[in-house]
Amino acid sequence: MQTTCRLPFQDVSGHRRGVIQTSHSPARKLAMLLIGLLIIRVIALFIAPWGLHGDEAQYWAWSQDLDFGYFSKPPMIAWVIAATTSIFGQAEWAVRLSAPFLHIATSVMIFLAARRFFDAQVGFWATATYTLMPAVWLSSFIMSTDAALLLCWAIALHAWACLRENGRWGRVIQLGLALGFGLLSKYAMAFMVPVLGLAVLLDLPTRRALLGPRGFVGAAIAAALLMPNLMWNAAHDFATISHTAENANLGRDLFNPEEVFQFWGDQFGVFGIVPFALLLIALVAAFRGTLPKPIRWLAALCALPLAAITVEALLSRANANWAVTAYVAGPILVAVWATRSPRRLAWLKWGLIAQTAVCLFVGGVAASERSVDAVGLTNAVKRLRAWPETSAQIEARLMADAYAYVATDNRLVFYDLNYYRVTNEMLETTELVMWSLNDAPAHHANLTRALPDTDAPILLLSYHHNFEEYFRADFETLEELPPITVGLGTGKTRVLKVWRGTGYRKTSLNDRT
């Protein structure tokens, strides 16, 4: 058994201020937990029957054409996928392979940061809270931009914790690198900057560490890493930055309380029902000053993304994961609050046990197509199924008639077909392209693979079934062919309307919807 003697919290490193532990330390227990989770999650990648989602296929396509930027995201996700697929090949599991490792690495950095701010017990429970989050369970099996972002955020948080204790140059470099690579992962990394700036002004340990040459060097490192992406944006009409701004969608009704309720309800699913309730209590306690002093800065790191995305939800809309950066400092907040009382800790422990049991059950169901269909979840996975079969039907059409291009009107369909090889060696003269709804590009496929003006025959695949008038405006001749229909299980089907068109001229309009 573990015995611990803990002195009162102070505003210095926990693991150096009186936490005396014997065998079975929190670090050892945590290592066993993380290794076990990593094994489970990697095995699940190999046995999962699901194809790539269109977004994952898009990121894979980017990884085949490495650059310093892409239309909707900075480049880190493409670089990460390129690293794994260059070694292990192009299978779905290889595309996703980095995800569980990135989340485990984030867990380790959260432990180190929490131990530096407080102590190893807080570090253990903070890390357990993070790594057992429902969102982390899901994100460990898919490839998304959040995995690299959260790792960079946790590395930056650890650097800050160390810098508050001493201003060593190595930690300054760590902070600059983490901020720069975080911004190359997702621009949401910028949520950390105003909190850091405020801490430089109001927090004496941070001011001593970063007000002066060290702060300048850290900022310069981050800016230097981001600069190639900014240059890419400048060369492409600031596509990524404009797309990020357009996500706010402020052109609609600017009062949407139902979106706020939806967003906050979703956070219980992201962080866990019991842990999120405890997080809200801990946030109140932190700002009231009833928790140890450093906790207010962690509370600010957690509260700022939640508050900013809440405002965005009220003014427009918000996806559940847009405030995900709150959940690096958030688990530390919960752990600090919970470990101050056995009863609180019991609530956290049983909440984690309950949500882990649910996640394991859902994961067990998701491991088989038959079990997913049996419990009525076919609709939830329909975008992950039958893309090879869809591609095979398209190839049969190409074998039956000559086409210079295969064009589609949907980004996700385009990237899934691109990954699953619409064209093969026998049909290598047929190019997969993206039909343009408007003149201005709406995504990376529009930007880089748009259907050019041509008189050659085109096989047009329509996922959206209300674009016929636009097709007829863009093509000189347009002949409707039998649709492509693919079964997706338990009565669900994928239907692509098919057209044969000639005399294509790209629209000059920008108001078609």
Image (spheres, grey):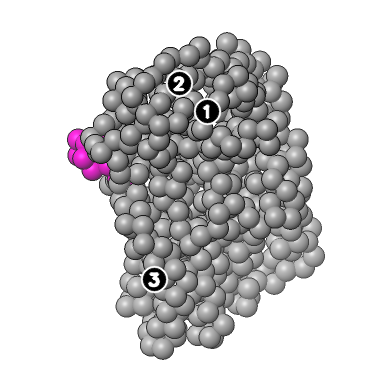
* Whole-percent x, y for residue 218 in the image: 45, 79
- Going from N to C along the chain, the mark reached first, 1 or 2, is 1
Give the class, few, some or many, for how many residues have Cα within 10 Å of label 1's Cα (few <14, many ≥20).
many
Q: Residue at x 41, y 56 (%)?
A: 188
For residue 109, what is the image quadrant? bottom right
Q: Of the residues shown, which amino acid type is indicated by label 3?
A: Leu
Label the magenta part by its dominant secondary structure. Answer: loop
Tell me whether circle 1 and circle 2 mark residues in contact (CB < 8 Å).
yes
Q: Secondary structure at mark 3?
A: helix
Give the class, few, some or many, for how many residues have Cα within 10 Å of label 2's Cα (few <14, many ≥20).
some
Mark whose residue sits in front, 3 or 1: 1
In this view, the residue in front, 441 or 225, is 441
Question: Is residue 400 part of the magenta span, yes or no?
Answer: no
Q: Secondary structure at mark 1?
A: loop
Q: Residue furthest front?
A: 455
- Going from N to C along the chain, the mark reached first, 3 or 1, is 3
Q: Of the residues shown, which amino acid type is indicated by label 2?
A: Arg
Q: Which residue is mark 2?
A: 500
In the displayed structure, would residue 424 be above or below residue 188? above
For residue 212, what is the image quadrant? bottom left
Q: Which numbered disc covers residue 303?
A: none
Q: Which residue is mark 3?
A: 196
In the displayed structure, would residue 287 be above or below residue 216? above
Q: Of the residues shown, which amino acid type is indicated by label 1?
A: Tyr
In this view, the residue in front, 68 or 283, is 68
Q: Secondary structure at mark 2?
A: strand
| Boundaries of the magenta span | 247-256
- Going from N to C along the chain, the mark reached first, 3 or 2, is 3
